[in-house]
Amino acid sequence: MKIIQKGNKATNSSSRDGHVPIAIVDHISGGTMSSMDAWFTSTGNVQSSAHFGVSKSGEIHQYVSIERKAWANGLSIANISKATAAIIKEHPKTNPNNYTVSIEHEGTDGALTEAQFVATVWLHKYISDEVKRIYGKPIALDERHVIGHFQVDPKRKPYCPGPKFPWSRLYNALITKEADEVKKDVVVSVLVNGKKVADGVADEGVTYTPARAVAEALGAKVDYDAKTKTMTITSKGDK
């Protein structure tokens, strides 16, 4: 996959002070990808940054190099003991920013699109491989070393990266071949009358896309019965 460099001179970062990255921390942006880009490159932002961002369309942006410390998971010495992640508690005198790599995800509740999920799985593996290339040892892609911001800072960020973040599927994909299999699929844009209405995934000649988005774009009425799990699409010409 392609990584688009977005960081600039205003992007916050600093030295890792000799520390080697040993963990990946997942975040939710709380807004759009464009707002994330703007904030992490703004001269008015003097408090935060992230290494990477993943959009809903599966685009990956990089703001800070892995060799540098991004300002995403910082804690005072006094607050490190409040972390719930074991890997953070085991470094009671070290700012977590020194040894973590941060990934922001476009969104508000942690629900990832299929394209976004594929991209973040690939990115986690890329980060692990890059850390091995640079420092000689990869980041283990398991529940101990891949954590959420809520496990680092439960007091200020109790919900980041969101209640719908697919932790189980992510961990499974990181230790199995799911990501490699998913990458064979092609993410496509679905247009109705020239206007994009959704993303789809093309697999062996079949395109999977949200039926509601396409139907409503064509002017049809969509009803869903949760009890029977039935979707009814009624076109304008039907009575």
Image (cartoon, grey):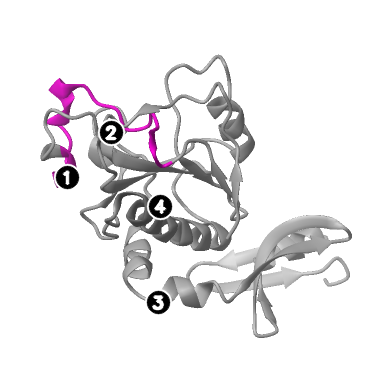
Query: Does residue 188 appear anywhere in the picture?
Result: yes
Magenta residues span 66-88
Q: CA distance from mark 2 to mark 3?
A: 31 Å
Tell me the residue that label 2 is attached to.
98
Tell me the residue that label 4 is attached to.
164
Quadrant of the image containing the C terminus: bottom right
Frontmost of labels 2 and 3 is 2
Tell me the residue that label 3 is attached to.
177
Q: CA distance from mark 4 to mark 1?
A: 23 Å
Query: Does residue 85 appear anywhere in the picture?
Result: no
- Please tell me whether mark 2 sits on a helix, a strand or a loop: helix
Which of pointers 4 and 2 lies earlier in the amino acid sequence? 2
Tell me the kind of residue under disc 1.
Ile
Which of pointers 1 and 2 lies earlier in the amino acid sequence? 1
Q: Classify mark 4: residues with Cα within 10 Å, few (<14), some (14-19) or many (20+).
A: few
Tell me the residue that label 1 is attached to.
87
Tell me the kind of residue under disc 2.
Asn
